[in-house]
C-alpha cells in the first residue's frame, strides 16, 4: 500500500517511511492511496474473534508490504495483552440501545493507548530492521504524553522527550508521565504554557541540526498515520459485538484533533455499516461551527473541564477535506493556506456532503457536569468529562432509536477528578488497582527555561548515543 499527501506535492511513501515521517514535505498529512474494502460476508466471518485477531484482519492490508504476517500478529498479541480487560474494549449499556465503549482499559487510562502501544512496537520493529534510531519529541497538555511514554518505554531504538508546561498539567497526568522509569524516557517541564512547548517542538522538527545528523526526530501526535489506523479496529469490534454487520450502528465520538472520529469514517468506507457519526466537541467547537454554518474559523482557545479536547484547529480534519475535495491536493493546499489567515468556506455541495457524513454538537462545561451527574444518578456509572460530552451529543443528535448508539469512552473518570467534583457528586473516582500507588511513586523530570536552545541542548546531550 502506498500513502499520498493531502497537499499533493510530496512523494508517495510506503508504510515504513510514513511511520517515521511526521508531516509530509509539502506540509500535508499522509493518507492511504486506496482503502481496503471488506464484504459483509467477510466482516461477518470475524464474529467472536479476540481483539488482537480482529486487529490483524482490519489492519494487515495497511502494513503488508513492510511486515510479515506472523510478526504483525505477534506484535498485536503483545500490544493488546497489556490492556486490563479481557475484551480489551468492553461495552457498557447506558439505556435501551445506548452504549459506551470503554477505551480506557490500557496502561494510561485513555483511548490513546490503543494506538500508542502499537506505535512504539511498530517503530522499534522497523528501526531494528533498518538499523536506525529516532528521537521522539512531543508536547503534551495531558493524555498524549503519558500514552506515548508508556508506548515507547521498552523500545531499544527510540529515545523519547516529552515537554509539558511546568505546573500546568493535572497531578494525575503529570505523575503518569514522570513516574515511568527508563533510560530512554525524558520528561521536560518547560517554564511556559502548552503553546510554548508546541512551538519548540515545531521549530525543532523544522531544523534538526541540533542533533548533529546522528539521529532524527519522529512524531507521535495524531498526524501519524499509524495512530489513525489502530483506531479503526474498535469500530469493527463494537459493531460485531452488537449484531453487525447485519445491522448498522451509530457512533458518537468526543473530538479534538479529529483523529478518532476520522478512524470511524474510514471504518465505514472500508465496508462497516455505520449510519451515523456524531462529532462531539466542547466549547472549542471549530468543527461544530463548520458543520453548522460552513465557516472554518479559528477562535481563541478556551480552557474547559475536558482539556484533552481543548484545541483551536483540528489537524486531522485536513484528511477529510482531502476527500471532500475529490482528493485534489492543490485545492486542499490553497484552502488551508487561506484558512491560516482567516475564515474560509467550501463549495456548498461539498459542505452538504460533509453534513451527510457527520452530525455535530458542542457541549459546555455546565452541560458536561449535568450529564455526569445524570448518568451517575440513573445507573451509578461514572463518566469522565470527555465521554460525558460524547453521551450528551449522542442524545442530542440521535436520528433513529432502533440503531444502537455507541459513545466512545475516551478516558477513565479517575483521570479527571475535578470535573467529577464539579458535577456535585460526592463519589470519588478510584484509580484502578495497577495505578493505585501512583501518588507514592518516584517522579523524574527536569525543569527548563522557556528557551528552545536550552531544550535542544538538553536533548542533544541526553539521547542514548549522544
Ligand atoms: C485525545 C483525546 C480526545 C480527542 O481525540 P482526537 O483524536 O484528538 O479527536 C478525546 N478524549 C480524550 C480523553 C483524549 O485523550
Image: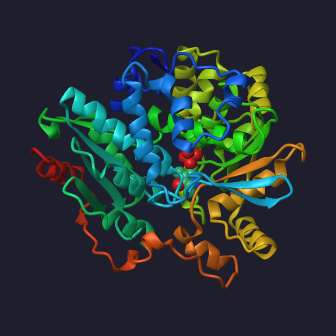
Q: Is residue 142 visible?
A: yes
Tell me: residue 75, above or below residue 99.
Answer: above
The x, y position of residue 156, in whole percent, is 21, 44
Q: How is the image coloured?
A: rainbow
The x, y position of residue 228, in whole percent, is 52, 36
Q: Is residue 149 left or right of residue 105?
A: left
Q: Which sits in the foreground, 427 or 81?
A: 81
The residue lying at 14 percent from left, 52 percent from top is 462
Tell me: residue 168, above or below residue 53.
Answer: below
The x, y position of residue 381, in whole percent, is 71, 70
Quadrant into which the C terminus falls: top left
User: For residue 95, which quarter of the picture?
Assistant: bottom right
Q: Is residue 212 left or right of residue 353?
A: left
Which residue appears farthest toward the bottom when viewing the image?
426
The residue lying at 82 percent from left, 54 percent from top is 395
Q: Is residue 312 visible?
A: no
Tell me: residue 450, above or below residue 379.
Answer: above
The x, y position of residue 161, in whole percent, is 27, 52
Q: Which sits in the foreground, 172 or 229?
A: 229
The residue lying at 64 percent from left, 15 percent from top is 326
Tell me: residue 125, above or below residue 114.
Answer: above
The residue lying at 28 percent from left, 50 percent from top is 154
User: For residue 50, which quarter of the picture?
Assistant: top right
User: How many dots with numbers?
Assistant: 0
Q: Is residue 42 left or right of residue 430?
A: right
Q: Is residue 458 left or right of residue 269?
A: left
Amino acid at each position: 500500500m502506498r500513502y499520498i499527501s493531502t497537499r499533493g506535492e510530496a512523494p508517495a511513501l510506503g508504510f515504513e517511511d510514513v511511520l517515521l515521517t511526521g508531516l509530509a514535505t509539502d506540509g500535508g498529512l499522509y493518507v492511504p492511496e486506496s482503502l481496503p474494502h471488506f464484504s459483509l460476508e467477510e466482516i461477518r466471518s470475524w464474529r467472536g474473534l479476540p481483539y488482537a485477531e480482529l486487529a490483524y484482519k482490519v489492519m494487515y492490508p495497511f502494513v503488508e508490504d513492510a511486515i510479515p504476517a506472523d510478526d504483525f500478529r505477534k506484535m498485536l498479541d503483545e500490544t493488546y495483552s497489556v490492556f486490563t480487560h479481557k475484551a480489551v474494549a468492553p461495552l457498557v449499556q447506558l439505556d435501551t440501545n445506548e452504549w459506551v465503549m470503554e477505551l480506557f482499559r490500557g496502561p494510561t487510562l485513555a483511548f490513546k493507548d490503543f494506538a500508542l502501544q502499537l506505535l512504539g512496537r511498530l517503530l522499534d520493529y522497523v528501526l531494528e530492521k533498518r538499523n536506525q534510531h529516532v528521537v521522539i519529541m512531543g508536547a503534551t497538555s495531558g493524555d498524549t504524553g503519558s500514552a506515548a511514554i508508556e508506548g515507547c518505554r521498552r523500545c531499544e531504538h527510540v529515545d523519547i522527550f516529552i515537554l509539558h508546561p511546568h505546573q500546568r498539567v493535572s497531578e494525575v497526568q503529570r505523575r503518569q508521565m514522570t513516574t515511568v522509569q527508563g533510560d530512554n524516557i525524558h520528561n521536560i517541564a518547560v517554564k511556559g504554557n502548552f503553546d510554548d512547548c508546541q512551538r519548540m517542538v515545531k521549530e525543532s522538527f523544522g531544523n534538526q541540526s541540533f542533533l548533529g545528523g546522528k539521529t532524527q526526530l519522529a512524531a507521535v501526535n495524531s498526524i501519524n498515520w499509524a495512530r489513525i489506523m489502530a483506531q479503526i479496529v474498535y469500530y469493527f469490534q463494537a459493531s460485531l459485538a452488537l449484531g453487525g454487520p447485519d445491522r448498522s450502528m451509530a457512533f458518537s465520538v468526543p473530538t479534538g484533533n479529529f483523529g478518532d472520529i476520522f478512524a470511524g469514517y474510514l471504518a465505514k468506507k472500508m465496508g462497516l455499516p455505520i449510519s451515523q457519526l456524531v462529532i462531539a466537541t466542547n466549547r472549542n467547537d471549530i468543527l461544530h461551527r463548520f458543520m453548522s454554518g460552513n465557516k472554518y474559523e479559528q477562535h481563541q482557545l478556551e480552557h474547559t473541564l475536558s482539556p484533552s479536547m481543548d484545541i483551536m484547529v483540528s489537524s486531522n480534519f485536513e484528511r477529510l477535506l482531502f476527500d471532500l475535495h475529490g482528493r485534489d491536493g492543490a485545492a486542499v493546499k490553497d484552502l488551508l493556506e487561506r484558512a491560516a489567515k482567516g475564515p474560509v468556506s467550501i463549495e456548498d455541495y461539498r459542505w452538504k456532503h460533509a453534513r451527510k457524513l457527520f452530525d455535530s454538537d458542542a457541549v459546555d462545561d455546565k452541560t458536561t457536569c449535568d450529564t455526569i451527574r445524570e448518568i451517575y444518578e440513573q445507573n451509578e456509572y461514572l463518566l469522565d468529562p470527555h465521554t460525558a460530552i460524547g453521551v450528551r451529543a449522542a442524545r442530542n443528535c440521535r436520528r433513529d432509536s432502533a440503531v444502537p448508539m455507541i459513545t466512545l469512552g475516551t478516558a477513565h473518570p479517575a483521570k479527571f477528578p475535578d470535573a467529577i467534583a464539579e458535577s456535585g457528586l460526592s463519589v470519588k473516582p478510584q484509580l484502578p488497582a495497577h495505578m493505585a500507588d501512583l501518588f507514592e511513586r518516584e517522579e523524574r523530570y527536569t525543569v527548563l527555561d522557556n528557551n528552545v536552545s536550552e531544550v535542544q541542548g538538553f536533548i542533544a546531550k541526553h539521547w542514548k548515543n549522544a
